[in-house]
């Protein structure tokens, strides 16, 4: 929040070719997250390769045999390497549901009109959820077990510590985040036909900083602007800052948006 005005003065160093490249890189880097959600995470129970059960049994027997025979123990960190395909990776059901969601969004955005076209992404998610529930891939058992209300306590994991190395690391990370947010603010300004001025950019960056501060107090990750939301502006055509207000977010996050109440 303190250095936001200084960063906003660098606005002239962000021509369209720079901001466009930033948005492109962000979008490409986020593609792997969606791919992992469809096929499976690269590590864990859905990894593409798993340890051969025979190799795991051999290593266990060798460890127990060495202990029984009085031989040097097998180092604890030795583990069998994944070597066989994981049948839980890239299940056809997940791919089918993901394809249905994508196709639904594209069809609704292309052929629907008015309000339905504006909520094409939401409609696609709902269609995918219905399919997942019908096929048994999604249940609400955990929702039924959860409490109706929950109290979030500040500093649940302990009071903050002030380590110089950690502070420097997070400062560098937040500078990168500020550059990323600058690119998204400028791209959003181009989409809505409203020029992003230096005070507007400074206000947006300060809002990112304030969100990160509040997030740290309430035990969550740093907050930043999301390029997915910028893409949604282009898909839905909705440009009103009151969308942010309705979502329970600070209206300052939409400062680069178009005039109040204006919709596409």
Image (cartoon, grey):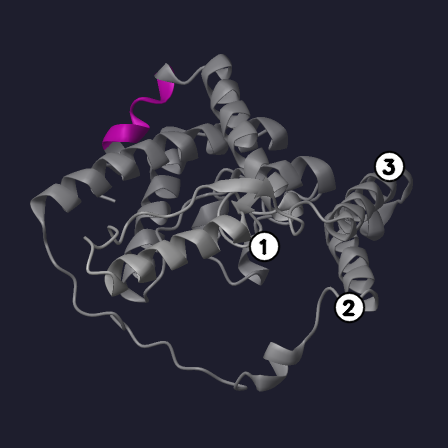
Quadrant the N terminus occupies: top left
Residue 218: % across, % down:
32, 67
Q: Label 3: which residue?
A: 110
Please tell me whether mark 1 sits on a helix, a strand or a loop: helix
Q: Nearer the viewer, mark 3 or mark 1?
A: 3
* Image quadrant in which you'd find residue 178: top left
Q: Nearer the viewer, mark 1 or mark 2?
A: 2
Label 3 vs 1, first from the N-terminus: 3
Q: Label 1: which residue?
A: 242
Label 3 vs 2, first from the N-terminus: 3
Please tell me whether mark 2 sits on a helix, a strand or a loop: loop
Q: Which residue is at 24% across, 50% downward?
A: 75
* Image quadrant in which you'd find residue 183: top left
Q: CA distance from mark 3 to mark 2?
A: 30 Å
- Crowding near the residue tagged with mark 1, few <14, some 14–19, many ≥20 C-alpha atoms within 10 Å: some
Quadrant the C terminus occupies: top right
Residue 57: % across, % down:
47, 56
Q: Between residues 145 and 83, which one lies in front from this camera angle?
A: 83
Q: Which residues are magenta?
A: 6-12
Q: From the viewer's perspective, is 96 left or right of 7?
A: right
Q: CA distance from mark 1 to mark 2?
A: 37 Å
Q: From the viewer's perspective, is 37 left or right of 216?
A: right
Residue 247: % across, % down:
56, 60
Q: Do the residues bearing badges 3 and 2 touch, measured as CB atoms within 8 Å?
A: no
* Image quadrant in which you'd find residue 214: bottom left
Q: Which residue is at 50% across, 13% downward?
A: 17
Q: Main secondary structure of the magenta part?
A: helix
Taking the image as drawn, is residue 95 in sight?
A: yes
Is residue 67 depicted above or below 114 in this figure?
below
Q: Which residue is at 42% across, 35% downward?
A: 181
Is residue 84 depicted above or below 18 in this figure?
below
Mark linked to residue 136: 2
């Amino acid at each position: 929040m303190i250095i936001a005005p200084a960063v906003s003065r660098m606005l002239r160093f962000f021509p369209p070719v720079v901001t466009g490249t930033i948005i492109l890189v962000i979008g490409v880097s986020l593609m792997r997250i969606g791919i992992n959600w469809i096929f499976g995470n690269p590590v864990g129970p859905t990894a593409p390769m798993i340890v051969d059960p025979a190799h795991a049994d051999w290593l266990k027997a060798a460890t127990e045999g060495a202990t029984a025979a009085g031989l040097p123990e097998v180092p604890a960190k030795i583990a069998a390497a994944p070597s066989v395909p994981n049948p839980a990776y890239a299940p056809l059901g997940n791919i089918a549901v993901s394809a249905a969601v994508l196709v639904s969004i594209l069809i609704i955005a292309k052929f629907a009109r008015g309000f339905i076209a504006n909520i094409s992404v939401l409609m696609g998610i709902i269609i995918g959820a219905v399919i997942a529930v019908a096929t048994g891939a999604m249940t609400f058992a955990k929702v039924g077990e959860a409490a109706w209300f929950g109290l979030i306590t500040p500093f649940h994991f302990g009071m903050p510590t002030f380590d110089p190395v950690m502070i420097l690391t997070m400062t560098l990370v937040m500078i990168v985040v500020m550059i990323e947010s600058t690119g998204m603010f400028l791209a959003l300004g181009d989409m809505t036909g409203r020029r992003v001025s230096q005070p507007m950019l400074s206000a947006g960056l300060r809002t990112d900083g304030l969100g990160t501060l509040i997030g740290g107090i309430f035990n969550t990750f740093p907050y930043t602007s999301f390029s997915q939301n910028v893409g949604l502006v282009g898909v839905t055509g909705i440009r009103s800052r009151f969308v942010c207000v309705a979502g329970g977010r600070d209206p300052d996050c939409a400062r680069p948006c178009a005039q109040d109440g204006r919709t596409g």
